[in-house]
Amino acid sequence: MKLSVKSDYAARALLGLARSFQTRAVRRAEDLADEQGVPANYLVQILIELKAAHLVNSVRGKEGGYLLARQPAEITLGDVLRAIHGNIFDSQALTDSQCPPVLRNAWEKMQEAVSRTANAINFQQLLDEADRSKMYYI
Amino acid sequence: MKLSVKSDYAARALLGLARSFQTRAVRRAEDLADEQGVPANYLVQILIELKAAHLVNSVRGKEGGYLLARQPAEITLGDVLRAIHGNIFDSQALTDSQCPPVLRNAWEKMQEAVSRTANAINFQQLLDEADRSKMYYI
DNA sequence: GCCTGCGTGAAACTATCCGTCAAAAGCGAC
DNA sequence: GTCGCTTTTGACGGATAGTTTCACGCAGGC
């Protein structure tokens, strides 16, 4: 049961965009990629998926780039995971009739636990937390 | 983020073994496989891993088979997942220095949530729950 | 019209998962 | 001892999904 790096990349990109949300500045995909240590060409694909999920908007042409579609507080890790994979927690067992109902219930319980904690983490919190830990160095 | 069928198979096998735990009966791998709808040759490998994790014991030779190593109440879903995959929740991000610390914290939070709920589900509960729902049909 | 950067699809590469098979080895019974 | 049953172990191959790169088309500003 592993999290794909893709979702991690997506989260990093959104975190980067959240940082520049107040200034309304658009960020070029390549800059974001460099800043976050993500393969540029790969990040482009990810950004497209994030746009399809209405988490980011894009501006074309010169001076173009990406920006958050909503307030950082309105975007959760759950949104990111759902945008990247269809479902946060996937298992063949959930649709396999051979799987004992009791076990299916158990898997669903775990699915729910993951969703709930992912939905409880939004990007405003992450920003605040980052600022707070940075203050220790001042 | 998906659960492998392997872990599901493992859980099914353990559930089957838990059912016959009171009678101390050993179960042949093939019977277990048929009963739980798992490819027999595959289940064999899984059972070996479960044995290495000290969740089941085996008896060789004629009249041989597998049996639970401990009380069903002492075996949790977390044990199963850890036996099959090394870690319940794996992510490259957790060891990637490029990943912002704030995000790593978030992933760790999710990891912890998964572990906690998996550790909270043991096989005695599953047995009881199965019995209870079966009673509705009597 | 030209430059910049987004948009999209396809190809290559990798890793891991699934499942099968065959041979080795332990155990009990006759 | 040897025969049959069952676990044990390792190797193998196909399938699937994840990762990455590349190439080219499209839109908007200057």
Image (cartoon, coloured by chain):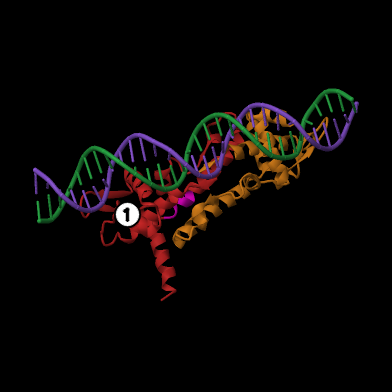
Chain colours: A orange, B red, C green, D purple
User: Residue visible at 60% across and 47% down?
Assistant: A118
Label 1: which secondary element = helix
Residue B8 on image: x %, y %: 44, 52
- Judge from the rendering whether residue D19 lies leftward or rightward of residue A107; answer left or right: right
| Residue B62, visible in the rendered structure | yes
Residue D20 in percent (x, y) is at 61, 30
Q: Most prominent secondary structure in the magenta stretch? A: helix
Of A117 and B84, nearer the camera is: B84
**Residue at x-position 43% and y-position 49%:** B7
Chain ID of residue with mark 1: B
Please indicate whether residue A6 sits to the left or right of residue D12 in the image: right
Q: Which residues are magenta?
A: B116-121
> What percent of the width, then of the height, locates residue B69?
29, 51
Q: Quadrant of residue A16?
A: top right
In front of the other: B112 or B28:
B28
Quadrant that contains the C terminus of chain B? bottom left
Residue at figure coordinates x 43%, y 74% from the top left:
B137
Amino acid type at circle 1 is Glu
Q: Which residue is mark 1?
A: B30
Q: Residues within 10 Å of mark 1 (few under 14, many from 20)?
A: some
- Which residue is drawn at the image coordinates 82% and 30% (left, top)? A63
Q: Quadrant of residue B122?
A: bottom left
**Image height of D23 relative to B136, above or below:** above
